Amino acid sequence: MSLASALEAMLLMATEPTTVDELAAALDAPADAVEAELRAVADFYDRHERGIRLRAVAGGWRFATDPQVAGEIEAWLVSEQRSRLSQAALETLSVIAYLQPVSRGRVASVRGVNVDGVVKTLLVRGLIREDGGDAVTGAMTFVTTPLFLQKLGLNSLAELPDLAPLLPDAVALEAELGQLAGAEPGPDPAEEDTDE
């Protein structure tokens, strides 16, 4: 495998800009050879007008999309087809909406599964945001955003429907939720929600 191929593969998997020294150490290659190859790969993508570019940013190298396709990417990301939420995400969003501000642990307790991935999805989609630490546990809490209200066609959270008519035993559920407020046992790690 060529040095260029190895660099492309590594940078494709990287989530942050990666320095020349890190890449050189990982590939057991001289830093100046890695630097030269990175510049050659970046030049290749620029010359051939590909949809991605290799850029030196923040002290390292990473792949980025071509700025000329920003409109297409934005349309794709916000299209209604891509905006549909899974059942797991809808359930997690509902718990946050009704109990906010609420910690991830409390949401996981209510749902009975690990919600880390789903919470990340809701954060990325802008439907929830971090709201500081819980006064008792110090855990980060989450609240819904104005985008959440906009998507539901609501002016405020006061317009959320009452749970009582929607659930056969809403009084018991509210009592259980009140008990969960005091104790936040973690969910079984084996039961992670992977449906985002």
Image: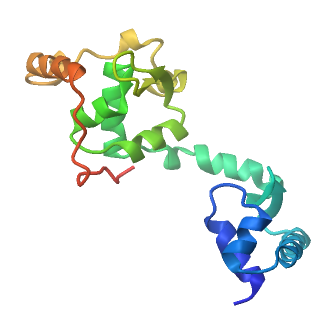
In percent of width and height, residue 99 lies at 31, 20
Where is residue 53, by image quadrant? bottom right
The image shows residue 158, relative to residue 54, as above or below, that is above
Where is residue 26, by image quadrant? bottom right
Q: Left of 83 or right of it: where is 70?
A: right
The image shows residue 110, relative to residue 29, as above or below, that is above
Which residue is at 39% across, 15% downward? 135
Work out whether residue 152 or residue 17 is closer to the camera in this orientation and state it: 17
In percent of width and height, residue 30 lies at 82, 78
In percent of width and height, residue 21 lies at 77, 66
Which residue is at 68% across, 46% downward? 74
Q: Left of 196 or right of it: where is 165?
A: left
Work out whether residue 90 or residue 165 is closer to the camera in this orientation and state it: 90
Task: Residue lying at the far bottom in this picture: please name it.
Answer: 1
Work out whether residue 89 or residue 167 is closer to the camera in this orientation and state it: 89
Q: Left of 88 or right of it: where is 111?
A: left
Give the colour scheme of this rendering: rainbow
Task: Residue lying at the far top in this picture: please name it.
Answer: 158
The image shows residue 27, relative to residue 18, as above or below, that is below
In percent of width and height, residue 137 lies at 35, 23
Which residue is at 10% across, 15% downward? 171
Q: Specify the quadrant that holds the N terminus.
A: bottom right
The image shows residue 116, relative to residue 126, as above or below, that is below
